[in-house]
Amino acid sequence: MTLKLGVNIDHVATLRQARRAAYPDPLDAGAIALAAGADYVVVHLRKDQRHINQTDVANLCKLFPKQIHLECSCSDFGQAAALKCKPYSVCIVPELPGEVTTTGGLNFTLAVQKRLSAMIEKLHKKHILVSLFVNPVATDLRMAAKLGADIVELCTAAYSEAKTQKQSQKLVQELALSALLAQELGLEVHAGHGLDYHNVLAVADIGGISCMNIGFAIITRALFTGLPSAVEEMKNLL
Ligand code: PXP
């Protein structure tokens, strides 16, 4: 199985919003990421639209109908945006007001199960694949399968924050067991959150994961790999 890469470009929009400017445009970032070999472009449409906004999602989906993976919460807002923009796939994530980033997988309370089930059905009617962002625990994987998800994205936040090698090895093992169970349940398996150039390989080596979704590490690395030529270009202009 070839491991695919979804590049999350939220923080291109974070930079744009820092100046309320027209650039950098996430559309350009998406095109560059795909031309460089990314398999998917990932964007998280938050309710507060603090980085990616609904117009970005609509434009990205128009331009790359088979390559946009939209993250949104299980809410009327997320559902309406997904049904309108029709991305290739949607990952439903928990979203807490004021959080800096997604803090973990979905919490499958009875109320959440009911809302997820209805949202999954509506997305499926529009032929949109549905992924659920889950913690790597058996009960949550079984719940994702029961609710009719096509994909689970295993949350790697705890792994990426591990403080010791022993802890990190234990968490990789948990991810590996979860990937195995998810496959047995007929789910496609993705992984993401907090992955970077140092910690990604241990997760990439787990069999059965088909796609890794990575944002912050790639966008921040791009600042430094791109800075020399940006400075050179300006210097040449002067
Ligand atoms: N996967 C999910 C479900 C996420 O919410 C995020 C962050 O938006 C990512 C992956 C990417 O995480 P990071 O930016 O830490 O690579």
Image (tube, rainbow, N blue to C red):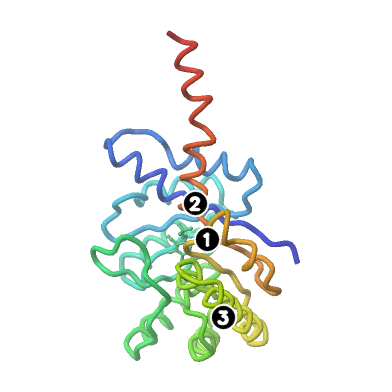
Residue highlighted by disc 1: 195
> Residue 202's spot in the image, x, y percent?
63, 67
Element class at badge 2: helix
Does residue 94 appear to the left or right of 90 in the view shown? left
Q: Residues within 10 Å of mark 1 (few under 14, many from 20)?
A: many
The quarter of the image holding the C terminus is top left
Secondary element at tag 3 = helix
Q: Contact, CB < 8 Å: mark 1 with mark 2? A: yes
Which of these two is toward me, 178 or 75?
178
Give the residue at x 59% y 61%.
Answer: 200
For marks 1 and 3, give the CA distance. 16 Å
The type of residue carrying mark 1 is: Leu
Question: Mark 3 sits on what residue?
Answer: 170
Where is residue 188? Give x, y as percent.
Answer: 63, 74
Q: Is mark 2 within 8 Å of ligand 1?
A: yes
Residue at position x 58%, y 69% from top?
190
In whole angstroms, how far apart are the C-alphas of marks 1 and 2?
7 Å
Measured as percent of width and height from the top left, residue 10 is found at: 41, 50
Residue drawn 61% across the image and 56% down it: 5
Tell which circle, 1 or 2, labels the residue nearer the N-terminal end.
Answer: 1
Residue assigned mark 2: 217
Q: In 3D space, how far apart are the residues under numbered discs 3 and 2 (Cα atoms)? A: 23 Å
Q: Residue furthest right?
A: 1
Graded by Cα atoms within 10 Å as few (under 14), some (14 to 19) or many (20 or more), the crowding at tag 3 reads some
Q: Quadrant of the N terminus?
A: bottom right
Name the amino acid, label 2: Ala
Is 211 drawn above or below residue 74 in the view shown?
above
